[in-house]
Image (tube, rainbow, N blue to C red):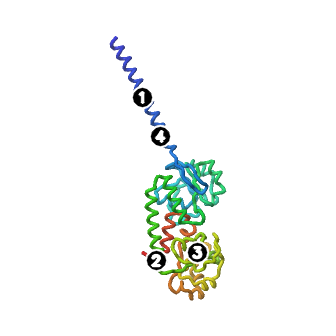
Amino acid sequence: MKKRLAAILSMVMLLLVGVVGCTSGDKSTKDSAKEEKKTVVVTDQKGEVEVPVNPKNVVVLDYGSLDIMTKLEVEPVALPKGSLPAYLDKYKDDKYVDLGSLKEFDLEKINEVAPDLIIIEGRQESYYEDLKKIAPVLYLGTANSDIFASAENNAKVLGKVFAKEEGVTTELGNINKRLEAVSAKVKENNSTALMTMFNEGSLSVYGTGSRYDMVYSKFGFTPADTQIEASNHGQNISFEYLKEKNPDYLFVLDRGAITGTQASVKEAVENELMKTTKAYKDGHIVYVNPQAWYVGGSGIMAIDTIISDVEAALGIK
C-alpha cells in the first residue's frame, strides 16, 4: 500500500512540475513576443509614424540614413548599391543584398528579405504606398533642401529607433563645435563666396535657399551675389560672371567626377580669365568632395567631409 501511495505521489509531483514548466515557458514566450513588438512613434516627412524599436531586418534606400546608421554601428540587410559613395564602400560586400539603384530598386528582393523597417528618401516617394504593404516605412532624406538640419533631425529619429540616442548627441555635438569654429573664422575675415557646380561643360551657381545654402547660412560666407535664383539645379552662369562677382572663395563641385563622364574640371575652371580673380590668386578655388556634397545626402559622415573641405580651405586643422 505504501509503495502504491508513493508511486501515486511521484506521478502527481511530475505533473505539477510539468504544469509549472509549461506556465513558465508560456510566460517566457509571451514576454519575448511583447519585447519583439515594442514600437516607438517618431516624426518623418509624412508626419507621425509608428515603427519597431531596434528592428533587425532593415532595408535602406537613403544613403544619408545609411551613413548615420554606419556611425551608430547599425547594419542594414539590403540597400541599392548603384551609386554608393566611397565612404560607404563596405556595403558593396555580398552579405548585403543589392537592390539596384536609388530610383530603380527591386521590390521583389525587398519582399524576400522580409524587412521589419524600410527607410526611404525623396527619390522613392512614389513607391511609398507599395513599400508600406511590405513593412513600416520611415521617410527621411533631405527636407526643404536643408542638409544640415535634416541630418540633425534624421540622426535624432534614428537614434530613437535604434536606441542610440547618446551616440547621436555626441556626434551632433562634435559637428556643432566645428561649425562654430568655421563660422567664426569666416566672419572674422568677412569673406565672400560662391558655390558652383561644373557638369558636362556647363556651370551653375547656388545661392541662399538652394541645396547648398549651408555655405552661407552655416559656414557664414557672404554670398558674392545676393540675386541668385533659389533652385535645386542652380542658375546657369559663365566664367565672365565669376570674374565680375569675384568672390574671395569659389567652391566648385565636379558633377562629372561622380559618373566619370568628364575629365578633371580643374583645367577648365582655371582658365586665363579665372586666373585674374581673387579666388585664384589667393589659392581659394576649392574643389569639394562631390560624393559627400552631391550624393551623400543628410548623413553625419557626409557632413564631416563637407566641413573638412571648408576647414582645409580656411587653414583650420
Residue at 55% over, 68% down: 291
For the residues labelled 3 and 1, the Cα–Cα distance comes to 70 Å
Number of the front mark, 3 or 4: 4
Residue at 45% over, 36% down: 28
For the residues labelled 1 and 2, the Cα–Cα distance comes to 70 Å
Front-most of residues 210 and 14: 210
What label does residue 20 carry, if any?
Answer: 1
In the image, residue 185 sits, relative to residue 47, either above or below, namely below
What label does residue 12 carry, if any?
Answer: none
Q: What residue type is labelled 4?
A: Ser
Front-most of residues 62 and 258: 62
Mark 4 and mark 1 lie on one chain; the one further toward the N terminus is 1
Q: Which amino acid does label 3 sit on?
A: Asp
Query: Hey, which quadrant is residue 19 in on the image?
Result: top left
Residue 296 position within the rendered picture, expressed as x and y whole percent measured from the top left: 55, 65
* Label 1: few (<14), some (14–19) or many (≥20) C-alpha neighbours in 10 Å: few
What label does residue 254 carry, if any?
Answer: 3
**Secondary element type, mark 3:** strand
Q: Do the residues labelled 1 and 2 touch (CB within 8 Å)?
A: no
**Secondary element type, mark 4:** helix
Number of the front mark, 3 or 1: 1
Residue 39 position within the rendered picture, expressed as x and y whole percent measured from the top left: 52, 47
* Label 2: few (<14), some (14–19) or many (≥20) C-alpha neighbours in 10 Å: some
Number of the front mark, 1 or 2: 2
Mark 2 and mark 4 lie on one chain; the one further toward the N terminus is 4
Number of the front mark, 2 or 3: 2
For the residues labelled 2 and 4, the Cα–Cα distance comes to 54 Å
The residue where tag 4 is placed is 32
**Secondary element type, mark 1:** helix
The residue where tag 2 is placed is 185
Q: Do the residues labelled 2 and 3 touch (CB within 8 Å)?
A: no
